[in-house]
Image: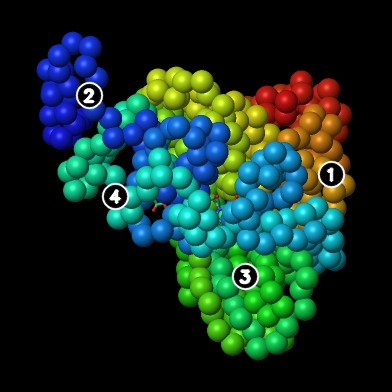
């Protein structure tokens, strides 16, 4: 239903003399000043300097309270270059730790902090990009926004980047975490990030500690869990961080800041139905479904979307919507294999055993791991990931690999009949037969 201010505006617009366009407040309105819309504003300011942009944020800063990290291989050299001013920390490599041992990887890793994001965008965005804080959007259409105050703003197009919203059309698991930036009373001894220390006690799902060393005595410590539910027990996670610091012999002098997240891990869904809920309004970021299906991370996708938008010849509402929707649908299709892996992880593997899947994954060749995070797996990579004896029961893995038919919540019920036909051999080790037997291995 269109709210009263917009109805009034539409009526006024309808009575303007023929050939007179309703006055516009901007060429483009970006609703939500988070990662995706901030990057779109930043990229458009560089690539399309004449464009008048209005960025509306309900809070008092751009980017909220996050540390967004990514692997070097996630971005092209050109993307690294335009993102560079926003990057606060870089490391030449990283490591992972499992009960079976530690592995060091030479792939670079980097982080954009929201404080730097906010500071750089505020100071470097040109005058034609206007940022309004404390401007909660109550309603929007493809070309107009109504603020909670009742003020109506019009533009050639609107992009909704207000974050993920619940939808019956996505079936999700969760990566949930709480992180604390700690100052220790001495050096922590880390020179590179530890992306997963899974030697910790497992509970609630696949649990690991994530460590980003920012200086000799400061670091971000996150207690993270791949879980079936989205409830975040902050006190328990804080206690997990304190226990971990103590076990490493670190004395915490100060908790500098805290961040938390519950990221979506897609198991299956109907992306076309999800986009129908947009009613023709262009979306960005998590709202567009643009994130890595297995990690919930969205920075590389947001960079690619900003590039796409900056390259579009026509930024009016209909072509913009079509281009972003088409891109999001293509990304979704390209990630079918990741959703298959997620279903195996979440539906075939007991929560306390999920670490075995990750330990096996981190035993694979480093270039494959890089391509996994960059969501650029080839057919042979997929075959390699599925080859051999999986660390979960084969029959359960095979049943879980199939998406639920429309109208059924879980993947298991819909796949029982297929198991009879395909048998327990289930997961094949050759790429040709993989392509032949499973629609998500392409
Ligand atoms: C703590 C945390 C750490 C993460 N770490 C990583 C990481 O390391 N790497 C990675 O790639 N991804 C990471 N993610 C996942 C993902 O990249 C982020 O969630 C990312 O911020 C999503 O971008 P977005 O633009 O879709 O939404 P957001 O960045 O959440 O932006 C939404 C914005 O809209 C604003 N808003 C909401 N409602 C309204 C309204 N009605 N009116 C106006 N404004 C509104 C919000 O205040 C917010 O600023 C992390 C997420 C969290 C929560």
Percent x, y for residue 242? 59, 81
Of the image marks 1 and 2, the number of the one nearer the N terminus: 2
Give how far apart the Cα atoms at labels 3 and 1 are. 26 Å
Percent across and percent down for residue 63 are: 47, 54
Q: CA distance from mark 3 to mark 4?
A: 30 Å
Q: Residue under circle 1? A: 367
- Write the residue at 65% across / 88% down: 185
Q: Identify the image quadrant of the N terminus.
A: top left
Observer-nearest residue: 184 or 25? 25
What residue sits right under mark 3 in the picture? 220
Q: Are marks 3 and 4 in contact (CB under 8 Å)?
A: no
Specify whether 350 is left or right of 126.
right
The residue at label 4 has a CB less than 8 Å from ligand 1: yes
The verdict on label 3 being within 8 Å of ligand 1 is no
The image shows residue 301 at horizontal and vertical percentages of: 59, 40
Label 3–label 1 contact, CB within 8 A:
no
Label 2 residue SS: loop
> For the residues marked 2 and 3, what is the alpha-carbon distance in whole angstroms?
49 Å
Mark 3 or mark 1: whose residue is earlier in sequence: 3
Task: Give the Cα distance between marks 1 and 2.
Answer: 53 Å
Q: Which mark is residue 22?
A: 2
Q: Which corner quadrant holds the C terminus? A: top right
Q: Quadrant of residue 341?
A: top right
Residue at the (63%, 44%) spot, across then down: 82
Circle 2 packing at 10 Å, graded few (<14), some (14-19), many (20+), is some
Q: Return the residue at label 4.
A: 136
**Dot 3, crowdedness within 10 Å: few (<14), some or many (≥20)?**
many
Task: Please say if 375 is above or below 68.
Answer: above
Q: Is residue 396 visible?
A: no
Name the front one of labels 1 and 2: 2
Distance from disc 1 to disc 4, alpha carbons, whole Å, reads 43 Å
Sequence-earlier tag: 2 or 3:
2
């Amino acid at each position: 239903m269109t709210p009263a201010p917009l109805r009034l505006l539409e009526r006024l617009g309808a009575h303007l003399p023929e050939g007179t366009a309703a006055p516009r407040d901007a060429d483009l309105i970006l609703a939500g000043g988070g990662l995706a819309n901030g990057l779109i504003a930043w990229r458009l300011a560089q690539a399309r300097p004449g464009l008048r942009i209005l960025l509306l944020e309900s809070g008092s800063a751009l980017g909220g309270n996050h540390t967004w990290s990514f692997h070097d291989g996630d971005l092209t050299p050109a993307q690294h270059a335009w993102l560079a001013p926003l990057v606060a920390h870089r490391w030449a490599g990283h490591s992972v730790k499992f009960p079976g041992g530690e592995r060091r990887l030479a792939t670079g890793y980097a982080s954009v902090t929201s404080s730097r994001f906010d500071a750089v965008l505020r100071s470097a965005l040109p005058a034609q990009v206007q940022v309004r804080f404390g401007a909660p959007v109550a309603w929007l259409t493809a070309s107009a926004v109504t603020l909670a105050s009742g003020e109506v703003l019009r533009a050639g197009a609107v992009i909704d980047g207000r974050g993920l919203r619940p939808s019956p059309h996505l079936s999700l698991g969760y990566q949930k975490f709480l992180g604390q930036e700690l100052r220790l009373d001495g050096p922590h001894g880390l020179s590179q990030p530890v992306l997963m220390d899974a030697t910790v006690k497992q509970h609630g799902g696949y649990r690991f500690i994530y460590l980003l060393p920012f200086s000799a005595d400061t670091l971000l410590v996150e207690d993270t869990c791949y879980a079936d539910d989205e409830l975040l027990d902050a006190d328990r996670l804080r206690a997990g961080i304190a226990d971990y610091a103590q076990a490493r012999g670190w004395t915490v002098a100060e908790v500098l800041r805290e961040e938390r997240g519950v990221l979506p891990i897609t198991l299956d869904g109907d992306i076309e139905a999800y986009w129908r809920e947009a009613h023709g309004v262009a979306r960005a970021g998590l709202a567009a479904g643009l994130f890595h299906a297995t990690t919930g991370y969205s920075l590389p996708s947001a960079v690619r979307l900003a590039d796409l938008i900056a390259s579009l010849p026509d930024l009016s509402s209909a072509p913009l919507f079509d281009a972003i929707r088409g891109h999001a649908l293509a990304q979704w299709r390209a990630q079918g294999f990741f959703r298959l892996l997620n279903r195996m992880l979440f539906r075939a593997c007991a929560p306390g055993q999920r670490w075995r899947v990750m330990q096996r994954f981190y035993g694979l060749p480093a270039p494959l791991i890089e391509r996994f995070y960059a969501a650029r797996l080839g057919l042979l990579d997929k075959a390699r990931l599925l080859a051999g004896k999986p660390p979960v029961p084969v029959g359960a893995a095979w049943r879980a690999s199939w998406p639920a038919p429309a109208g059924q919540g879980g993947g298991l019920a819909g796949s029982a009949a297929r198991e009879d036909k395909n048998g327990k051999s289930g997961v094949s080790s050759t790429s040709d037969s993989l392509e032949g037997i499973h629609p998500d291995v392409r």
